[in-house]
Image: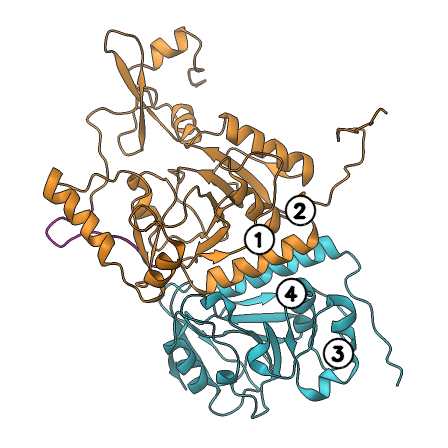
Chain colours: A orange, B cyan
């Protein structure tokens, strides 16, 4: 027997609901989101669904975006700060197909920004919603593997173990060696995993005017940080929290204040640093900012030199 | 007794999406008035915003508590039919509840505040009031509010703000309140502090 499977395309009517999820699932996620917003930083369990991509590829973020997106929204998807990497491209196309979504690469135009591992460099504004893809929502998991125990630790705000871990870091290495997924305290109550964003981005969460939603599909948890909410990176009075800094500016746009990726160029030890936020870097190049390696990169047709 | 059940959403997918975003904004930015949806014919006894919120969020997984007069009238039949939700007698069993702002019972403390390990299992209480403005002013602060914010709803029982203050002291436990009137709502999650009432 031949099974004819129709693949949704331009000509065929899609065989699924708007934004892929059925309405009952959306209601369940929406209820979880409202409770998550009411208790900032607390992880709300939810019935994570199978999605048409593997768990670990952003199914939590996708389910949140699917539950909130509507026809008036403009969606931006980034992966490690870039709009043009595999995960970002495929998730953007998923919502173009299933929700007929308007997409954009411009941070300031977007109403929903789904992200993996970065917060855009451009400041977020009121009315924007950040959706984070979270692989491990439990900040205490590496210290205590049992969910029953971590749940009690959160319930009773027993976060001494986390302070001990940070202290041991300082005792052994002279500084806290956690550089991403750096634990934060939200609204002075719950310790929260900010998802694997670099600690460079942690200060952007504090009192942000945007609503921040976090989805962990495999671990089946949703949590949130409302706008104008205190998000404090854990530290000690004599070892205050510090973000990364670089000695070189971005090789393409010359930015000194953005988060830079290190790119190995050859096997002779040559390397360059370049903005991880691709839209931020392009915007700066269009404004006429030039980094020391922009000439080389445009000669090789790796980037377009700004038309000015 | 024959009860006529009025229609629900004409376009369930997009109407519930729009209503949800209004409710999400209401709880994310407590004290701001959010318009839920225009031109909705709610059953007798429910404000349009209350009816829309329940239609958007409630289903067979979420028991609803209604005042007895509403439960036995068209509103109860409407919710049973459109949401498939169970209507419960005990306030503490409810995921969602509707109360009138002026009635003296049940108290907010009668609803489920959640448990220390699962504070998300608390009741969301929709308080129907006479208006969302024009009353005595109340100053709020907390997550979602830059500095402080003033609201002035009317038609709330004496002692309502004291009850909400007690509720906020339970944080992270506590109920979440949505004030509704007409087609608009104001969110008052448990994280919101009542700074001053005048």
Q: Residues within 10 Å of mark 1 (few under 14, many from 20)?
A: some
The residue at which mark 4 appears reads as B61
Residue A139 in magenta?
no
Report how far apart the C-alphas of labels 4 and 2 lie in the structure.
17 Å
Instruction: Give the residue at the far right of this rendering.
Output: B2
Instruction: Quickly name the residue at label 2.
Output: A21
Whether residues under marks 4 and 2 lie with C-beta atoms below 8 angstroms apart, the answer is no
The residue under label 3 is B75
Viewer-nearest of labels 4 and 2?
Answer: 4
Does label 4 or label 3 sit earlier along the sequence?
Answer: 4
- Of the image marks 1 and 2, the number of the one nearer the N terminus: 2
Task: Specify few, some or many for label 2: CA neighbours under 10 Å numbering under 14, 14-19, or 20 or more.
Answer: some
Question: Residue A47: which numbered mark, if any?
Answer: 1
- In what element is the residue under mark 2? loop
The chain letter for the residue carrying disc 3 is B
Q: Nearer the viewer, mark 2 or mark 3?
A: 2
Q: Are the residues flagged by discs 4 and 3 from a single subunit?
A: yes
Q: Secondary structure at mark 1?
A: loop
Query: Dots 1 and 4: beta carbons under 8 Å?
Result: no
Q: Quadrant of residue A294?
A: top left
| Tag in front: 1 or 2 | 1
Q: Which residues are magenta?
A: A229-241
Rendered residue at 24%/52% (across/down): A162
The chain carrying label 1 is A
Considering the image in quadrants, where does the C terminus of chain B appear? bottom left
Badge 3 marks a residue whose secondary structure is helix
């Amino acid at each position: 027997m031949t099974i004819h499977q129709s693949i949704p395309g331009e000509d065929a009517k899609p065989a699924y609901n708007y934004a892929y999820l059925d309405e009952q699932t959306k209601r369940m996620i929406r209820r979880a989101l409202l409770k998550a917003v009411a208790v900032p930083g607390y992880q709300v369990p939810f019935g994570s669904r199978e999605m048409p991509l593997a768990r670990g590829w952003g199914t939590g973020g996708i389910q949140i975006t699917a539950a909130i997106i509507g026809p008036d929204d403009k969606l931006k998807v980034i992966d490690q700060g870039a709009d043009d990497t595999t995960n970002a491209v495929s998730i953007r196309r998923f919502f173009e197909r299933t929700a007929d979504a308007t997409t954009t690469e411009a941070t300031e135009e977007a109403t929903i920004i789904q992200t993996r591992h970065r917060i855009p460099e451009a400041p977020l504004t009121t009315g924007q919603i950040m959706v984070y893809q979270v692989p491990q929502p439990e900040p205490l998991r590496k210290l205590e593997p049992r969910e029953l125990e971590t749940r009690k630790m959160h319930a009773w705000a027993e976060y001494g173990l986390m302070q001990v871990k940070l202290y041991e870091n300082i005792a052994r290495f002279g500084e806290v060696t956690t550089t991403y997924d750096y634990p934060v305290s939200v609204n002075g109550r719950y310790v929260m995993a900010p998802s694997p964003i670099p600690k460079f981005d942690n200060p952007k969460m504090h009192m942000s005017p945007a609503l921040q939603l976090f989805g962990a599909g495999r671990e089946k948890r949703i949590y949130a940080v409302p706008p104008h909410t205190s998000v404090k990176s854990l530290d000690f009075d004599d070892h205050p929290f510090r973000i990364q800094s670089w000695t070189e500016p971005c090789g393409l746009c010359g930015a000194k204040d953005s988060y830079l990726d290190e790119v190995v160029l050859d096997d002779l030890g040559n390397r360059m640093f370049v903005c991880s936020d691709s839209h931020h870097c392009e915007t700066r190049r269009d404004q006429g900012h030039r980094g020391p390696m922009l000439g080389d990169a445009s000669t090789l047709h790796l980037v377009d030199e700004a038309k000015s | 007794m024959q009860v006529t059940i009025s229609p629900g959403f004409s376009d369930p997918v997009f109407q519930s999406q729009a209503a949800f975003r209004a409710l999400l904004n209401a709880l994310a930015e407590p004290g701001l008035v959010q318009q839920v949806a225009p031109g909705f014919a709610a059953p007798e006894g429910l404000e349009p915003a209350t009816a829309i919120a329940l239609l958007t969020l409630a289903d067979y997984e979420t028991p609803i508590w209604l005042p007895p007069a509403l439960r036995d009238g068209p509103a109860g039949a409407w919710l049973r039919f459109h949401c498939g939700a169970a209507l419960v007698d005990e306030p503490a069993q409810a995921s969602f509840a509707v109360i009138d702002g002026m009635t003296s019972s049940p108290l907010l403390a009668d609803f489920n505040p959640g448990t220390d390990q699962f504070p998300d299992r608390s009741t969301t209480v929709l308080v129907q009031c006479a208006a969302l403005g024009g009353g005595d002013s109340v100053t709020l602060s907390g997550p979602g509010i830059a500095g402080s914010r003033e609201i002035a709803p009317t038609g709330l029982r004496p002692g309502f703000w004291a009850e909400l203050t007690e509720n906020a002291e339970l944080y992270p436990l506590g109920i979440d309140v949505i004030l509704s009137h007409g087609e608009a709502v104001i969110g008052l999650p448990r994280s919101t502090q009542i700074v001053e009432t005048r």
